[in-house]
Amino acid sequence: MLPLLALACAVCVAAIYFPQAISPLIAADLRVSPSAAAQTATGAQLGYALGIFLLVPLGDRLRNRPLIVTLMALTGVCLLIAAAAPNLAVLLVAGSLAGVFTVVPQIIMPMVAGLVPDNRRGAAVGTVLGGLLGGILLARTFGGTIGEWLGWRAPYIVAAVIILLLAAVLAVTAPHTTPAAKHNYPSLLAESLRLFRREPELRRSALYQALLFGGFSAAWTCLALLISSPRYGLGAETVGLIGLAGAVSVFVTPVAGRWIDRKGPDPVNMISILGAVVSAVILAFGLLGGVAGLVFLVAGLILVDLAVQSGQVANQSRIFALKPEERGRLNTAYMTCSFLGGTLGSWLGVQLYDLFGWIAVATFVAFVALVALIRHLVHLSGRRGTPAPASEEPSAATLR
């Protein structure tokens, strides 16, 4: 089932990211500024954060198969409404609602973590997350290419059809699960907040991802603005091709997962944070323009993708080991923070780009990565002064 569930993660998460590639086309057709059109990506991310907080806890309370199918069907309907939007306001509302419902990956990942042995959790989560990453990266290729050929509405229609077809497949093939919790809905929401307060490892993991994902979102949201500016004068299809080049990171997340199973999450966190710092330096050279500038942009975006997704595997392996019976609620708290960070990063990126240009966006990526690095060094320094329990294994499952 892992490849099919990874595919489901890919197509659902794509609904959040393909608007990043087509925002210049939306601006031209609806006669709004490029910065205003770029808020379609921000709205989708904000909707996703709300959906994680409001809907993902139901994964601990309800049977996963019907929940997944229902959410995918609602996502498809919202995408069709977005495709028919007569103005930017309707598009923002419909796209944001699609983001609310397309939280299926955050239900699938805790489900997978509960269906495999502890010593395979990192690899299994890495495989599913590889599908998620493929959806994130290829969404821009899909959106930019189809949008350039058929107009910005076409990606919404195609995405809706694919999601609805896959929902029909999962309605008869997704694993049967038994709900792990019997709490009522308000207590499920409160439980996510309680876990965030009580679990320092959850807070640390969420901080890392919120910071790195904020930089990631700023870079990708502003890429379309830079590519379509006079410095490059290129179209949405170019953004899609850059996303295709970044798909190499799909093959890295399962490797990161296996390394986490052997060594634990902290070494992978260190590498991913340092990778984000280096990516910011490389991205700054995108100001060169021309072929050289494109080479630096592609290299920097691939590296920041690798950093964010490898860090995601490490962080989720850590939090899923904390309380196996509460994985859905742990993931709710973690991913809500992650996408709030992504939403804020996307919004700040557009503001910085409007005020100071691309160099400010690259500086922002470096800043958030350095904040994460300082926090991680503080954690490692504290661990050196604390002897580990004699029974502790290097597996992610023992990091509590």
Image (cartoon, rainbow, N blue to C red):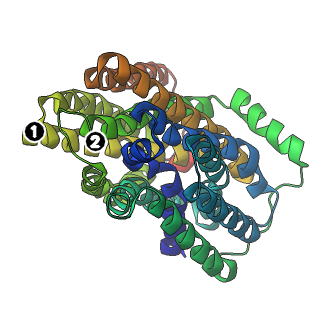
- For label 2, the SS is helix
**Do the residues under discs 2 and 1 have CB atoms within 8 angstroms?**
no
Nearer-the-camera pick, 48 or 264: 48
Residue 270: quarter of image: top left
In the rendered structure, which amino acid carries the disc numbered 1? Gly
In the depicted structure, whether residue 66 falls above or below residue 302: below
Dot 1: within a 10 Å radius of its alpha carbon, few (fewer than 14), some, or many (20 or more) residues? few
Q: Where is residue 6 in the image (x, y as percent from the top left)?
A: 50, 66
Residue that badge 2 annotates:
301
In the depicted structure, whether residue 10 falls above or below residue 380: below
Indicate which label's residue lies in the foreground, 2 or 1.
1
Q: Residue at x 63, y 38 (%)?
A: 336
Q: In 3D space, how far apart are the residues under numbered discs 2 and 1 (Cα atoms)?
A: 17 Å
Quadrant that contains the N terminus: bottom right
Q: Position of residue 251 (x, y in %)?
A: 32, 60
In the depicted structure, whether residue 190 falls above or below residue 357: below
Nearer-the-camera pick, 42 or 110: 42
- Lower position in the chain sequence, tag 2 or tag 1: 1
Quadrant that contains the C terminus: top right
- For label 1, the SS is helix
Q: In this view, does 292 lie to the left or right of 202?
A: left
Q: Where is residue 72 in the image (x, y as percent from the top left)?
A: 65, 65
Residue 319: quarter of image: top right
Q: Is residue 78 left or right of residue 318?
A: right
In the rendered structure, which amino acid carries the disc numbered 2? Leu
Q: Residue at x 19, y 40 (%)?
A: 233
Dot 2: within a 10 Å radius of its alpha carbon, few (fewer than 14), some, or many (20 or more) residues? many
Residue that badge 1 annotates:
290
Q: Which residue is drawn at 17% across and 38% down?
A: 232
